[in-house]
Image (cartoon, helix red, strand yellow):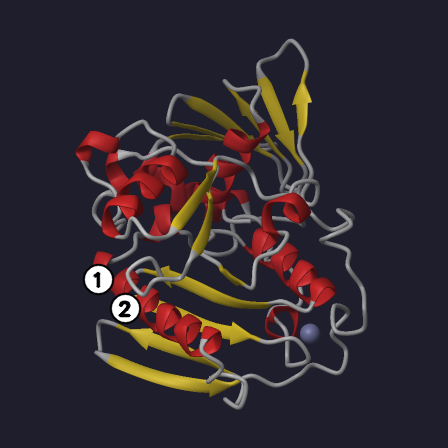
Amino acid sequence: MARAGVGELVLIDRDWVEQTNLQRQLLFDEADLGEPKAVAAARQLGRVNSAIRVFPRVRDLSPDSIEGLLEGCDLVLDGTDNFASRLLLNDWALETGTAWIYSAALGYRGQSALFLPGGPCFRCFLPEIPPVGSVATCDTAGVLGPAVGVVASLSACKALRYLTGQAEEDAPGIDLFDASQSAMRRAALQPDPACPACHGERDFLLGDAYPRSSVLCGRNAVQLPGAGAIDLAELAARLAPHGDVQPSRFFLRFAVEGLTLTVFPDGRCVILGTEDPARARAVKDRYLGG
Ligand SMILES: [Zn+2]
């Protein structure tokens, strides 16, 4: 977008640059380690094109913050790593009549789709958040750097088509890419007659369905609610390569990145070692999905 001369870019990210990002996140290098991603990215894009304005926002996108963060944007490019943020974004986009582009990559695979006001929405495609731990995430399954590049290019292409008025007539669809086969196909997106979001429900934007966190006073811990029953044994097996896992009958303990996650069978998760809900949610999304 910066190289194409899109005049104003708002960059929203709650995370800091880590060593493990550098294999796929081309805006960053070793000198940026530990810096907020939005700030490091804005600096780099300022070098790419000094004629545009870039606004870094080191914030957690939530039902409370989304209106202020996205107000006035003509188009939103999703580069998030969790379903709750996308369903929240979907609600906001429907409510404000704004187009947005979904991008995702995992392992060798990637997906990209443009959602237009009045067309099938993201929730027609994904009605509910999958239960915690039921899906692989970038940090449990890995993500191939070049697959991210392909998805980013597909989505950037859609963005430029949309901004130049060429995308309105495109049939709704999702591009599915598999780098292991060099294969790409486009699946049609159909409106779901039962889609609550298309019928005006905004339970993610209103916060009712959005996973809430609570800081556990005096315990240096944050609690994140669960979204449904999970299989602790299966989760333990998937997390084992990534940190110290201690399963028990009633919960699973997982130590990673200086934090200890305690996951309960109903999906509830207590993250010990921080009182920052944004950091807690980031780590949970990274390893458990969400
Ligand atoms: Zn829908």
Q: Can residue 279 be spotted in the picture?
A: yes
- Distance Cα–Cα, label 1 vs label 2: 6 Å
Quadrant observed for ligand 1 in the rendered image: bottom right
Q: Residue at x 57, y 48 (%)?
A: 132
List the single residue furthest toward the top.
218
In this figure, which residue is indicated by the disc labeled 2? Answer: 150
Q: Is residue 253 above or below residue 115?
A: above
In this figure, which residue is indicated by the disc labeled 1? Answer: 146
Q: Position of residue 260 (x, y in %)?
A: 47, 24
Q: Is residue 186 above or below residue 104?
A: below
> What amino acid does circle 1 point to?
Pro
Q: Residue at x 27, y 49 (%)?
A: 25
Q: Can residue 248 be spotted in the picture?
A: no
Q: Position of residue 147 (x, y in %)?
A: 26, 64
Q: Position of residue 45 (x, y in %)?
A: 30, 48
Asked where in the image residue 93 lies, by quadrant, the reply is: bottom right
Q: Are marks 1 and 2 in contact (CB under 8 Å)?
A: yes
Please state if 261 lies on the left or on the right of 84 as rendered.
left
Query: Depth check: 218 or 43 in front?
Result: 43
Query: Depth check: 277 or 285 in front?
Result: 277
Q: Residue at x 39, y 46 (%)?
A: 238
